[in-house]
Image (spheres, rainbow, N blue to C red):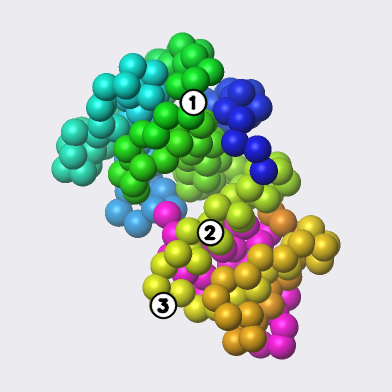
Amino acid sequence: MTRDPLLLSGDVDDATTRLLRTAARFDATDLAQDCLLPGWTRGHLLAHLSRNADALVNALTSARTGDLVPMYPSDEARAAGIEAGAFRSPQEHLDDLRRSADRYAEAVAAMPVPAWSATVQTRRGPLPAAVLVWRRLRELEVHHVDLAAGYRPQDWSPSFAHRLLHEVVTDLGERDRVPPLVLHFDGGSHELVIGDRAQAPVVSGPTVEVAAWLTGRSPGTTLTVTPDGQLPDPPEWI
């Protein structure tokens, strides 16, 4: 799978448009309702998405200039920024989403080609700058589902779900004490393995359905398990 950020920028634009369309429907009551993330309202999640765009602007600026610009001053500052923005009016949320998305797009457009190969520091460790566009797309698509406002994993494109699966499996495979698992998707033509396959159940289904279940965004009722048995609980992701 390519990490060429220019090939994903159009997908980010489309995902942003879809998110803004959903956010434009919210009134104050809607924003105060819980989203799918424990302890957060929809207002918290929209504030997070706005601040995530600004954090990625910081990372892109760091890659472009060579200066160390942290995504967030600290985890505490990140949490405080989300909490402070969670209870704004619907129009304030919408304006913030639009303006932060514009700042992000401008930062991407300002990147010279060599800067995409720079290494930047993120909350989860160093990453190539070229991965940041994918990270924004992932935030938009997964958290749009988390708003619980009609956007579903089934609305993800197969290419997005395929890439998401690869990322999640790689991440889980680097952790300790993750139960072994074999995933079959793309009609059974593709396979990903976590841990010792000899000890692992096989979970099969369409790519989008497997990705939704593995990321905790679906109960996986359409998936099958071999040998026959109960679908295992997926490890916690984000």
Could you tell me the amino acid type at mark 1? Trp
Picture coordinates of residue 231, whole percent (x, y): 61, 78
Split into 4 quadrants, where in the image is the N terminus? top right
Q: Dot 1: within a 10 Å radius of its alpha carbon, few (fewer than 14), some, or many (20 or more) residues?
A: many
Would residue 114 be found to the left or right of residue 191 on screen? left
Residue 43 at x, y percent in the picture: 34, 37
Q: Secondary structure at mark 2?
A: helix
What residue sits 36% from the left and 42% below the top?
126
Which comes sooner in the sequence, label 2 or label 3?
2
Magenta stretch? Answer: 209-238
| Residue labelled with disc 1 | 116
Task: Name the residue that disc number 3 marks.
Answer: 177
Q: Nearer the viewer, residue 81 or 95?
A: 81
Is 144 placed above or below 173 here? above
Marks 2 and 3, Cα distance to the nearest angstrom? 14 Å
Q: Disc 2 residue type?
A: Thr
Residue 226 is inside the magenta segment: yes
Residue at point 29%, 32% (across, down): 71
Q: Around disc 2, counting alpha carbons within 10 Å, would you say few (fewer than 14), some (14 to 19), or many (20 or more)?
A: some
The quarter of the displayed image where residue 55 is located: top left
In the rendered image, the quadrant that contains the C terminus is bottom left
Q: Position of residue 117 (x, y in %)?
A: 48, 29
Q: Cα distance, mark 1 to mark 3?
A: 34 Å
The residue singled out by tag 2 in the image is 170
